[in-house]
Amino acid sequence: MSGCTTTVRAAAPEKMAAPPDPLATQPYRKKGAPLVMQVLAHPDDDLFFMNPDTVHSLQAGTPVVSVYVTAGESTGVNHEPFGPRHHHRHDRAAYSSARHQGLRQAYATMLGLPHFTPWTTEVLDLGGGLRAEMDALRHGGRYARLVFLQVSMHEPAPGASLPLMWSRPGIALPYVDARDAPAADDRHSVYTHQRLLDVLAGLMERFRPTEIRTLDPDPDIQAHTVGAEQPGFSDHRDHTAAALFTWKAMAQWVSRSAGGTGTVPAFTTTAYRGYYTHHWPYNLQPATVALKARFLFQYGGNASWHCGNTAGCGDYGQGENEPLANRKGWIRSTHRRYPGAHRIAAGPYAYEVLGNRAVRRAETRPGSGVWGEPEDLGGGTLAPALSCVRTRDGETLLFALRFAVLEGHGGPNTRDIVMWRGGGWSSLGSPETDQDRTRRTGVPVAVTAPDGSVHLFARNAAKGVSTRVLTAGVWSPWRDLGGGEVQDGLAVVTDKRGRVHVFGSGHTTVHHWAQPSPAAPVAYALLKHLPTPGDIPTATRSPTGTITLTYPLPASTETHRVSL
């Protein structure tokens, strides 16, 4: 491996960035060549929770930069699968290095190369005394880079550190060396809340991704947690903290770019669920699961392999057949945190989220389906999925889930649903009033009924459905519709009588809410004898008024379709 040093500029440590102004609009920076940046808490998060999207990006020729926030050192025990752990030596530096090697093996395979292919290594100067190893490998038109930030998973006192550094002021976490790494630190460098934000925002500015992938910043409330899940929530606490840092760093990047160059970075976002997958039917067909397993096999490696890395040849606990045999089933699903439409055409315009802000594009020629340059509509830091309706008088309403406050560090952290109408934004609040419960709000979906009312729906913190209705210019309060638990990704449609219907995929069936008659309140109306859904549903109305409900079956290539 060759070595050189590249500088990534970072802002002055501990100077907090101003939050983006939700009403300000800016021109967009010219979009560069496609590049995906993935920000992970641990080595293997991309292989379990983002694949097959990662390998599909590489196969399409889109460069991927994967940034690993923690050193992944855990207790330092690199144990073989299915075997005893008590006799293994604790060596955090070696375990971190072995996991890095496992990633190189997995990514080389995804690039179409032998798994022990040598990589080129650089040391990035991140500022503030921090450095990071960056490994790079190219194969034809395919290109991957792996960046290791090496934040400690543990503070000096017991407990996970990254969540505390997110939530509490005054937490500083050490840089953890990986065995024989070129970026080994002998200066006792530390990360703080703002330094990590500066590093992430600096990497975003360096690579200028056109898509940023994160983990889930706001996992479901889960009474019965499993294994490494944080108490009360369906994910690992490091996943949550890393995602929150990433979303805040994106807001910082946008704010500083808009204030500096006067332009907004043009990127989209995708967030992925983590341990959530254990609690719902599996949504990947067998061939896709086998593809994910192939790369996890390379990542897990084997203690008998001769890879050239003296600290280890993979994360042995994920080797052999362990990911497929594990009852938690993480490999068997890939769920997006914000399902729904990421670009919506409405009349002569299309709407989407770009740079975490809403934009509108005009059609270049009527009926062409070709859209022009983005016009910034502002809105603040928005989740990527939008809902758009036309009112009976032809007005466009746009709905989005917003990161209303994203402070951490002892400050608040809330979400709300916002509406764009006639050039301005207004908050419609959340189905929840408790700050922490607002973070579990789902993406909004809306429909205009024939009587002119606009019905807005969103998944609430209890995993049910809540609604508000706009009638004669006045919004009703939020109302919980009751019924069963559903995944986010609601489908909404009106029937030939003008009644509103809502569908959501539950644990064993598709749940249904509908108006008993036009203008009546929407109520729970369970559909009987429907098979278990493997993922979210779609609902369409034919010209004759028939509603067709379609959804995939679990772990299958088959879909179920029923007319209502």
Image: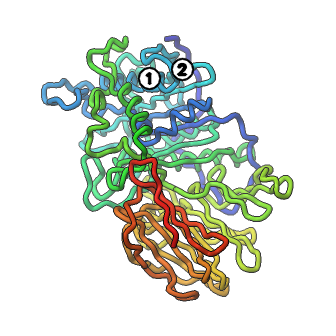
Residue 137: mark: 2
- Which residue lies under the disc numbered 1? 104
Residue 234 appears at what percent x and percent y?
A: 34, 54
The quarter of the displayed image where residue 260 is located? top right
Q: Badge 2, how many Cα within 10 Å: few under 14, some, many 20+?
A: some
Task: Give the Cα distance between marks 1 and 2.
Answer: 9 Å
The front one of 506 and 11 is: 506
Quadrant of the rendered image containing residue 141: top right
Question: Is residue 86 depicted above or below 519 in this figure?
Answer: above
Q: Tell me: residue 197, above or below residue 356.
A: above
Q: Amino acid at mark 1?
A: Arg
Quadrant in the rendering for residue 76: top left
- Does any portion of residue 246 appear in the rendered image? yes
**Which residue is nearer to you in this view: 23 or 495?**
495
Label 2: state its secondary structure.
strand
Give the residue type at disc 2.
Leu
Q: Is label 1 in a helix, a strand or a loop?
A: helix
